[in-house]
Every structure is written in C-alpha cells, then in structure tokens.
Amino acid sequence: MAFTKETAIEMLSGGEISEFNAARPYEEDELLDLSEVDFTNFNLVGANLSLADLNGVNFSEMELEGVNFSGSDLVSSSFLRTSIVDTDFTGANLNGAIFVGSNCQANFTDADVSGADFSDGDFAESDFTLAVNMSMCKFDNYTVWPDSSNLPDDFDSEYVADAIDEDDETPSDYY
C-alpha cells in the first residue's frame, strides 16, 4: 500500500504518531507532501516531520513538543502563538514562516529564516548560532532573543524601527 498524503493526515489526526513515524517514507530527493494542511487540532508530540513539504501549513496556537522538522520545507507556514519545545528545525527552509507571539525552545542550525516573522515571541531558549539569513528576519522590540552565544556573530538583536511606508501603517521592522 502506498503512503499517501491522505494516509499521513489520517494517522496524524488520529494521534497515531508512532505508527506514522514508522510508516512514512524518508527520501531526501522527494519530500513527503503535507503542504497546505491545517494541523491546529492535531497532537503532534514526537512527530517526525523531517524531509517533508510543509509549505503553507498551519501550526498556530498548538503545543509542539519533540517534533523533528529537520530538512523540511516550511515556507510560509504559521506558528502563530505556538508553544514549541525541544523541536528541531535543523536545515529547514523557514522563509516567510510566522512565529508571532510564540514561545520557542528549538534548534535552528542551518535553518534558512529569511523573511520569517519572530515578532512578540520568546526565543530565549533557542539556538540560532548557525541559522542562515538572520539578517532578513522580522522582529520587534517585544521579541526575546537568546544570549549572544546562541545567535550568529553578525546578528544585531536590537530592534530599530524604520520610517513608515506611505502604503503601510506599520513600521518596517527588519533587522
């Protein structure tokens, strides 16, 4: 029997995490397609979502613990007001991901965070030491960063508001 997107969603929605982790394929050249899924009512504790296409997935207002996202494509995914504990984003593509208002304890080694929005989040227990494109992430003066030993050497975690664009009522707050 082929492992399909529908099979994966059925297993994950039913809380069959161990069965999902054992049955799903792991192929670096072909990511498991779970794109555009709304996981907000799922219990994903301990799920291995590595090497998966999670583009545009909604993980908002959840508790994610022990989830493995390593090597996954999480472009434009939402972690809005999510509790993220002992989670691995190693090598993940997080371009444009939204972490607004999240509390996060995670490893971002080699993760590409270009355009990710970390506004109003607590990342004090996260490791961004080897994260990629930190200079292009978005944050505000409410973002709590880890100490400098867990940030890239060239990253300035000090928030500086730019002038307001004519078409936008909010300040541009990119590093």
Image (cartoon, helix red, strand yellow):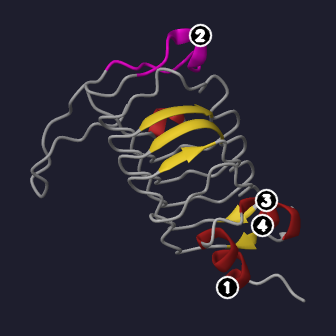
Query: Comparing marks 3 and 1, which lies closer to the viewer?
Result: 3
Amino acid of disc 4: Phe
Q: Which residue lies under the disc numbered 2?
A: 149
- Dominant secondary structure of the residues highlighted in magenta in the image: loop
Label 3 vs label 1: CA separation?
17 Å
Residue 4 is left or right of residue 108, and the answer is right
On screen, residue 164 above or below 37: above
Q: Which residues are magenta?
A: 145-158
Picture mark count: 4
Do the residues under discs 4 and 2 have CB atoms within 8 angstroms? no
Query: Comparing marks 1 and 2, which lies closer to the viewer?
Result: 1
Do the residues under discs 3 and 4 have CB atoms within 8 angstroms? yes
- Residue 59 in the image, given as x and y percentages of width and height: 48, 58
- Residue 142 in the image, given as x and y percentages of width and height: 26, 27
Q: Which mark is residue 18?
A: 3
Q: Is residue 94 visible?
A: yes
Amino acid of disc 2: Ser
Q: Which residue is found at the position 86% from the left and 70% from the top?
A: 23
Q: Which residue lies under the disc numbered 1?
A: 6
- Residue 105 in the image, given as x and y percentages of width and height: 55, 30
Q: Which residue lies under the disc numbered 4?
A: 20
Label 3 vs label 4: CA separation?
5 Å
Q: Which mark is residue 135?
A: none
Closer to the chain start, of discs 1 and 4, is 1
Q: Of 104 and 11, which appears nearest the observer?
A: 11
Q: Is residue 27 visible?
A: no
